Image: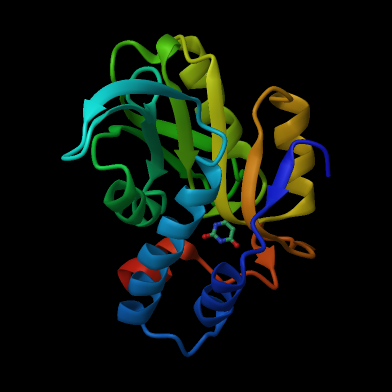
Amino acid sequence: MDGVTVIDHPLVQHKLTLMRKKETSTASFRRLLREISTLLCYEVTRELDLTTMRIETPMEEMDAPILEGKKLVFASILRAGNGLLEGMLDLVPAARVAHIGLYRDHETLQPVEYYFKAPEDLENRLIIVVDPMLATANSASAAMTKLKERGARNIRFLCLLAAPEGIERFRSAHPDIPIFTASIDARLNERGYIVPGLGDAGDRMYGTK
Ligand code: URA
């Protein structure tokens, strides 16, 4: 699918299966999410530009590769996005973090913004937006619009699971933003849940109902 990368690494797929199982405990779900997000982060940052820096090893001088440009921004769509943040920050500890508070009105399925906090200079940074579930795409799409209004020009979206309907809506609203996901599931159900999915990601990671 155009603009969509499915991260099919065996470790990602194995951990995702464990997360989907309904008997997986909150503690295990959270641990698996942290582990899988590190692997997803590795893939979503695979194409980052490098430059070189002159360094001295104990043996001699060399031009060694380092990441080019300003620090990355990880933008979490609250609250479930926070579950992906921890593992990503393990891998890129210097990343800046944005929080976008959007909840889904259960009647209309439309996103309602209640919080937005991001670093100032979004225009000069790569922003990786994280939310485990790309379902209706209403929240993700609204988050992208908000980031673009604040100057963001280089955005990637990372999720665990995506519904085909969500991908289509997201890509028609934001064709410039690539999607990275561990799986494209079968469909959305009538309540806007991904099927077969894993249930409500926020509830499963925080033990709420
Ligand atoms: N959000 C979730 O947590 N799960 C879904 O299946 C859809 C949206």
Residue lying at 69% horizontally and 25% vertically, measured from the top left = 174
| Outermost residue to the bottom | 23
Q: 47 or 160: which is nearer to us?
A: 47
Q: Quadrant of residue 122?
A: top left
Measured as percent of width and height from the top left, residue 20 is found at 56, 77
Q: Can you say which quadrant of the picture contains the C terminus?
A: bottom left
Residue lying at 65% horizontally and 40% vertically, measured from the top left = 179
The answer to whether any part of residue 208 appears in the image is no
Instruction: Report how many numbered discs are placed on residues in the image.
Output: 0
Against 38, is 33 above or below?
below
Residue lying at 54% horizontally and 43% vertically, measured from the top left = 44
Measured as percent of width and height from the top left, residue 123 is found at 44, 10
Q: 54 or 78: which is nearer to us?
A: 54
Q: 209 or 61: which is nearer to us?
A: 61
| Outermost residue to the left | 58
Relative to 87, is 23 on the left or the right? right
Against 154, is 196 above or below?
below
Q: 51 or 5: which is nearer to us?
A: 51
Measured as percent of width and height from the top left, residue 98 is found at 32, 31
Ligand 1 shows up in the quarter that is bottom right
Residue lying at 57% horizontally and 78% vertically, measured from the top left = 14
